[in-house]
Image (cartoon, rainbow, N blue to C red):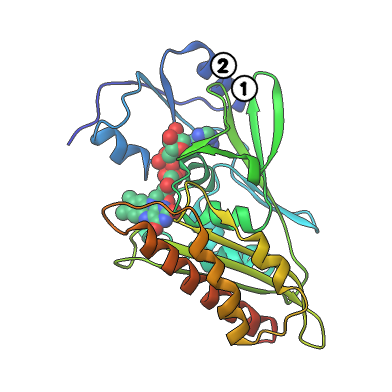
Amino acid sequence: MKPPPFSYHDPSSVGEVINLLETLENPKLLAGGQSLMPMLNMRYVMPDHLIDLNKVEGLSYIEDNKESISIGGMTLQRDLEYSELIKAKCPLMHDALQQIGHRQTRNRGTIGGSLSHLDPAAELPAVCAAHDAVIILQGPGGEREIPFSDFPIAYMTPVTKEDELLTGVKIPIWQEGHGYAFVEFARRHGDFAITSAAALLEVDQGGGITRASLTVGGVGAAPVRMTSIEEALIGQNGDEEKLRELCESCREIDALGDVYASSEYRQHLATVMSRRALVKAYSRSNGGV
Ligand SMILES: Cc1cc2nc3c(=O)[nH]c(=O)nc-3n(C[C@H](O)[C@H](O)[C@H](O)COP(=O)(O)OP(=O)(O)OC[C@H]3O[C@@H](n4cnc5c(N)ncnc54)[C@H](O)[C@@H]3O)c2cc1C
């Protein structure tokens, strides 16, 4: 299959990209192409212009800001996977990255492309939801920062305007030694998950949970934070029966159903993935693997 005809542009600065977005009719940004190229080949999208971001300067970086990590929109998933900083300070992302597609897709795929594509089952949006990440968008009016909770506005649709691009992501980090786990259920290795769960836990010296974040992916139109479970986890000591009981409320999520899985099956997977993620995260908070 071949893509529809388009004109190709390869700007070298963010300013040039914004100018092209403002002036061209029906443009589309190209990052790693790992989702866009199949969509072009299948003619799901038919842009008149492709604006390639690969030569744009200053969009690929991973920076330690002590309380947060800043990541450029064009940073490759591969560079994140092999980053010692990400592994040490944002181990949930490291865990998740190894479950994204294949080595070949991670070699080209970017964080900004994954967040902008916003597949409900994609790992990086779930990690951003779990960490309360802040998305940085740039357009003709300058830069704006969007809390991840406000970033998805509909199924596979971010709040990004037509003349904006995603230039970066800020990930607030959790205390050293926190528990984390990203678990998912996919039909085959490398497939998009049917359902995933991302857990973060901070635990005091007596084993009591003091802070919790639980996100379910692939079930709703965007990653869902299970705030009622997060609140109920405070003060718990990781007892597996209690975690199982708390995760039962995932059966109430308004779940998608499609040819791969019914909504009831996704709700069931959400309870199981959530429990597994919490059990693993709790164990890791005590030095487990
Ligand atoms: C075989 C295969 C398996 C895969 N499995 C998984 C998986 O398990 N989990 C998963 O999460 N992903 C998976 N993917 C998708 C992959 O992770 C993609 O890399 C990702 O979805 C898109 O990133 P990209 O950089 O390739 O973006 P592109 O494909 O280039 O772009 C995707 C969309 O985002 C827009 N866009 C890109 N960058 C920006 C930006 N900076 N600002 C605004 N808009 C932008 C584009 O216009 C386009 O609409 C798979 C892909 C393949 C081919």
| 14 over 69 or under it: above or below | above
For badge 1, the amino acid type reads: Gly
| SS assignment at label 2 | helix
Any mark on residue 15, and which? 1
Discs 1, 2 touching: Cβ within 8 Å: yes
Q: Position of residue 19 (x, y in %)?
A: 56, 16
Quadrant of the rendering where the N terminus is positioned: top left
Q: Quadrant of ligand 1?
A: top left
Label 2 beta carbon less than 8 Å to ligand 1: no
Is residue 1 visible to the viewer in this orientation of the structure? yes
| 244 over 186 or under it: above or below | below
For badge 2, the amino acid type reads: Asn
Q: Nearer the viewer, residue 259 or 126?
A: 259
Residue at the (51%, 57%) spot, across then down:
253
How far is mark 1 from mark 2, CA to CA?
A: 6 Å
Residue at the (51%, 60%) spot, across then down:
252
Any mark on residue 133, and which? none
| SS assignment at label 1 | helix
Residue 258 appears left or right of 271: left
Label 1 beta carbon less than 8 Å to ligand 1: no
Residue at the (56%, 54%) spot, across then down:
224
* Mark 1 Cα-neighbour bin, 10 Å: few <14, some 14–19, many ≥20: some
Any mark on residue 19, and which? 2
Q: Nearer the viewer, residue 44 or 155?
A: 155
